[in-house]
Structures are given as structure tokens and as C-alpha cells.
């Protein structure tokens, strides 16, 4: 009796579509794959409002946009390409309708920020990399700059952890000022790089600020917390 019940539960859960939320960075040379599912809608969320949409097979997809969001619902299993124009930016996608269990529910899209860019054209200041420890993890803040198109401040950094760490990434990154949390839109991690004794990750935090301010960058890892204060003059 128990075995048929287990098989029934396995079949039930394996038949359920698993939604996925992810963040991607793009430029005009990218074509990103968006995985769709029949009977489901997928939302592409942009930092700026889309102005024009061009679909290779518009008859097989229901595509609408409102505000900064583009919603896509497949009407068939046809694969197509899709181009979305926002101002003078062009985003390219490949729409793939999958019969698998995992599909894209929400995709947050940012214009790719160069890794070597000053905060503002008139600024002559440079951010000096700093680091701090959180237990066995070392956090490096390598660069902070303003990304005009996305209207966000970007914190580029990296992590070094022991190879033996059971949890390879921090539980949380956040930023505070005067005891209050600042608005963190997203934190994106790169793929892991393995060394002989350590693991290394790069990360990118998208921080919403009205203007450059002093703030405290915080991280938690394996129940321990650490922080580093960042002065506005170091990145404005």
C-alpha cells in the first residue's frame, strides 16, 4: 500500500510546473533564452519602459506590455525570436516553449554595466577596494558606480570561502544607513571558480539611491555577520 502511494505522490509533484525567478544582464550583442510553458505567463521586467516589440512568430504568442513589464504566453510549442526596444537599447531573446517542469516565471533584466566605468563622467574620484571578514568568508568590495540607464548604483565585489564550506554563498547581503535598510533591487552571483583550497565568486548588487550617501554594506554567513562602511566621497 505504501509503495503505490509514494509512486502516486512522485508522479503528482513531477507533473507540476516549477516557476523560476532570475536576473540577467544584457547588451545589444546578447540573445538570451527565455523558457516558457503552455498555460503559463512569463514576465520580463525591465529597468526602463519598452517602446517597441518585434516577434518572429507573433501568431504563436500572446505578448503584451504595460509599464516596465512585458508578459508572454505561448499559444503553441513553436520556437521564435523576440526583440524589445527601450529607447536606443535593443534586447534580443530566443523564446523556447518547453514541456519540462521548470520554466521562467519572472525574469528581471538589466542593461549590462561595464566593469570599468567611473561613477559619473565629471568625477575624478576612484573607489579604493576594501574587504572585511564574516567568519570563514572574506568579502571584497571592488567597485561602486552609478549606472545611468538602469538608474541604480552598482556594487561589484567578490567572495573567497574555504573549499570545505558546506554553504558556498552568504545567506544575505544588504545595506543600511542610520539604522534603516536601503533598497537593494537584486544581488547577482557569477559562476564559482575553484582554487586548491578556496572557492571564489563574483557578485553584483543593484542599490537604489537618490544620491550618493554614506552607507554600510552588510553580509551574513553561517550565522555570523560582518560589515564595512562606505563613504560617499569614495564613489560619487
Image (cartoon, rainbow, N blue to C red):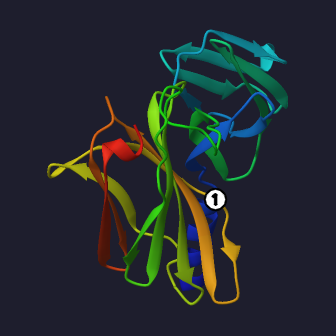
Quadrant of the rendering where the N terminus is positioned: bottom right
Residue that sits furthest to the left in the current view: 179
Most foreground residue, 130 or 64 = 130
Q: Which residue is mark 1?
A: 190
Is disc 1 placed on a helix, strand or loop?
loop
- Tell me if residue 224 comes above or below residue 119 in the rendering: below
Q: Residue at x 46, y 75 (%)?
A: 138
How many numbered marks, from 0 up?
1
Quadrant assignment, res 9: bottom right
168 with respect to 14 (left or right): left
Badge 1: residue crowd in 10 Å (few <14, some 14–19, many ≥20): few
* Res. 163 image quadrant: bottom right
The x, y position of residue 43, in whole percent, is 56, 30
Horizontal arrangement in the rendering, residue 37 relative to residue 94 (left or right): left
Q: Residue at x 76, y 13 (%)?
A: 54
| Viewer-side residue, 231 vs 58 | 231
| Residue 146 visible at all | yes
Residue 116 coordinates in the image, percent (x, y): 64, 43
Task: State the image quarter where residue 98 is shown.
Answer: top right
**In this picture, residue 97 sits left or right of residue 179:** right
Residue shown at the point (80%, 34%) measured from the top left: 31
Above/below status of 166 relative to 89 = below
Amino acid at each position: 500500500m505504501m509503495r503505490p502511494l509514494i509512486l502516486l505522490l512522485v508522479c503528482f509533484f513531477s507533473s507540476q510546473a516549477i516557476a523560476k525567478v532570475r536576473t540577467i544582464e544584457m547588451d545589444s550583442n546578447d540573445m538570451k533564452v527565455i523558457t516558457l510553458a503552455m498555460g503559463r505567463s512569463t514576465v520580463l521586467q525591465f529597468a526602463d519602459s519598452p517602446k517597441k516589440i518585434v516577434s518572429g512568430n507573433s501568431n504563436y504568442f500572446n505578448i503584451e506590455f504595460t509599464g516596465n513589464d512585458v508578459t508572454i504566453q505561448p499559444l503553441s510549442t513553436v520556437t521564435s525570436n523576440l526583440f524589445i526596444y527601450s529607447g536606443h537599447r535593443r534586447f534580443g531573446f530566443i523564446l523556447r516553449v518547453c514541456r519540462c517542469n521548470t520554466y521562467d516565471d519572472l525574469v528581471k533584466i538589466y542593461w549590462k554595466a561595464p566593469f570599468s566605468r567611473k561613477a559619473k563622467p565629471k568625477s575624478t574620484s576612484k573607489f579604493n577596494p576594501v574587504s572585511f571578514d564574516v567568519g570563514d568568508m572574506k568579502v571584497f568590495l571592488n567597485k561602486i558606480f552609478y549606472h545611468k540607464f538602469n538608474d541604480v548604483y552598482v556594487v561589484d565585489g567578490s567572495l573567497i570561502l574555504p573549499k570545505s564550506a558546506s554553504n558556498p554563498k552568504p545567506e544575505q547581503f544588504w545595506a543600511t544607513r542610520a539604522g534603516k535598510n536601503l533598497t537593494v533591487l537584486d544581488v547577482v552571483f557569477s559562476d564559482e571558480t575553484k582554487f586548491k583550497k578556496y572557492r571564489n565568486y563574483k557578485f553584483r548588487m543593484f542599490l537604489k539611491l537618490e544620491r550618493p550617501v554614506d552607507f554600510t554594506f552588510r553580509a551574513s554567513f553561517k550565522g555570523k555577520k560582518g560589515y564595512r562602511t562606505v563613504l560617499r566621497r569614495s564613489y560619487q
